[in-house]
Amino acid sequence: MSKNWYSIQVWAGREEEIKKALEEYLAKENLSDKVEKIFVPPPKEIEVVFSPERQEVRRFYSGYFLIYGEIDDNLKEVIRNMEGVLDIVGGDKVYFFTSEEVEKLMSQLVVEEIKPKPRYQFMPGDRVKILEGPFANFIGTVDEVRPDKGKVKVLVSIFGRETPVDIDFTNLQKI
């Protein structure tokens, strides 16, 4: 039997824990030669909600990891019966991935930078406080929201005049 890439569906958020349990089992049963690599897609997306103090990390392909090795019927049963494992993708007719597919997936996940993807909660007319920058601690009114640029135009009172200032979503807090 040749080595292939297999996708394992597991409980979301417990990928690393289940990977570690599988590695420990393989080492204990002297089956480490059957599984060469276990790849858990890294967390990549960060959403900033309302302010920089609260960040949420999410995984791409949450609830899955990849195994490279020779998986025979005995090892399939062991994997399926592990706590937290839902199934091997493909069910009875186990599907395996080509090396090219997996390399493409890995390069996409590893090359991309983690970029904050703000989820804005601002509407024109909202009162906001600027948290950082030269206008820190100023209070203003949202004039325009530009989600494509991740910025908000805020009208701030400077020397008694309303002045428009462009501020990142991450540097604002709704009042």
Image (cartoon, rainbow, N blue to C red):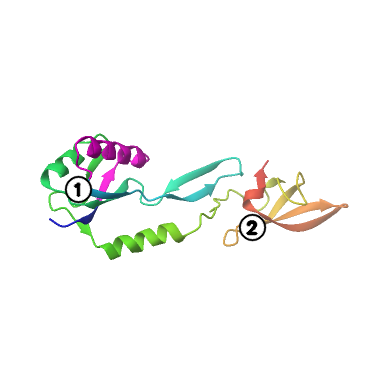
Q: Tell me what residue is drawn at x 57 percent, y 40 percent.
A: 54
Query: Residue at position x 24%, y 41% from top?
Result: 86
Q: Mark 2 highlights which residue? A: 151
The disc label shown at residue 34, or none: 1
Quadrant occupied by the N terminus: bottom left
5 horizontally vs 158: left or right: left
Q: Residue at x 37, y 51 (%)?
A: 41
Q: Nearer the viewer, mark 2 or mark 1?
A: 1
Q: How crowded is mark 1: few (under 14 residues within 10 Å), some or many (20 or more)?
A: some
Specify the amino acid type for callout 2: Lys
Which of the labelled discs sits on residue 62, or is there none? none
Q: In this view, does 142 lie to the left or right of 7?
A: right
Q: Give the secondary structure at mark 2.
A: strand
Residue 12 painted magenta: yes
Mark 1 or mark 2, which is nearer the start of the sequence?
1
Residue 58: x and y in percent read: 44, 46
Q: Distance between the residues labelled 2 and 1?
A: 51 Å
Answer left or right for 45 relative to 34: right
Residues 129 and 133: in front is: 133
Residue 46 appears at what percent x and percent y? 51, 49
